[in-house]
Amino acid sequence: MYRIDIMTLFPDVVGDMLCESVLGRGQERGYIRIECHQIRDYTKNKQKQVDDYPYGGGRGAVMQADPLYHCWKHICDEAGERIHTIYLSPAGKTFCQADARRLKDSYNRLILVCGHYEGIDERFIEECVDEEISLGDFVMTGGEIPAMAVADAVCRLVPGVLSDPSCYENESHWSGTLEAPQYSRPEIWHDRAVPSILLSGNHAKVDQWRRKQSILRTWERRPDLFEQLDLSSKEDRKLVAELEEELGHSLLDTVR
């Protein structure tokens, strides 16, 4: 079983969200377990205060090291070992699919720490946090949404959570490309028809079409990813040649 413990000021909100849909079924079937811990339960004052004014002045408040530490220590003591701990922070490394795979493959349990206010006491980070992760170059009011995103991305890769590995291996970012367009019923909607190749029943041709569209979409939308693609196989070289003929120019020259 893969387990994630989330340290948060809003355990009910986070827990309810992660108990729905695919992750909810994964927990019911025993493939994963997600536990939320209320940081306020580990304070030493009657007001359940977890923040205070920052040293040096400035606006806002900072989450104190002590309640964070005692919550973190409770989780680790219960496990009987130190658990790989991640702080969701705008100062962290930007999270990507490769990180989701790394976290799933390298650890069987994680602690995700959700900050609030102006952040958390640096001393807790120095003593207890193993890595900091960000969702991107923007700031949110708290770490709960980033924590849910990381938990979702990691847990859906755990065997058994999704019905088959192909459910995620054919998706965007798994192999460095964006996923090809998807269609469902009806065949015609608002005068827009499903591409005929998808109705042909020729699975080999469908796979070729999807790979071609995946290459095209990555070139159009994410040139940074396209530049890193390995398109040296005979099949990919043929698809790239077809695209270049259709577009009237070289894909690589345009990216550069």
Image: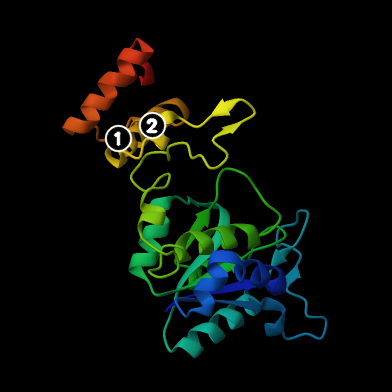
Q: Nearer the viewer, residue 91 or 9?
A: 9
**Would residue 16 be seen by someone viewing this image from the given angle?**
yes
Which amino acid type corresponds to the residue marked 2 in the rendered image?
A: Ile
Q: Going 40% across and 68% down the picture, which residue do you hit?
A: 158
Which amino acid type corresponds to the residue marked 1 in the rendered image?
A: Lys
Q: Nearer the viewer, residue 13 or 70?
A: 13
Q: Which mark is residue 143?
A: none
Residue 1 image-quadrant placement: bottom left
Q: Is residue 139 above or below residue 177?
A: below
Residue 242 image-quadrant placement: top left
Q: Tell me the residue that label 1 is attached to.
A: 205
Q: Is residue 47 above or below residue 115?
A: below
Q: CA distance from mark 1 to mark 2?
A: 7 Å
Q: Going 56% across and 86% down the picture, which residue do you hit?
A: 74
Q: Nearer the viewer, residue 36 or 232?
A: 232
Q: Going 48% across and 79% down the picture, which residue do you hit?
A: 29
Count of numbered circles in the view: 2
Mark 1 touching mark 2, by CB under 8 A? yes
Q: Decide if residue 162 is on the left or right side of residue 237.
A: right
Residue 78 rendering spot, x and y as whole percentages: 50, 89
Q: Going 27% across and 39% down the picture, which residue do you hit?
A: 204
**Would residue 9 be seen by someone viewing this image from the given angle?**
no
Q: Is residue 47 above or below residue 150?
A: below
State the SS at label 1.
Answer: helix
Q: Which mark is residue 197?
A: 2
Residue lying furthest top in this view? 248
Residue 201 rendering spot, x and y as whole percentages: 35, 40
Q: Looking at the image, what colour scheme do you see? A: rainbow
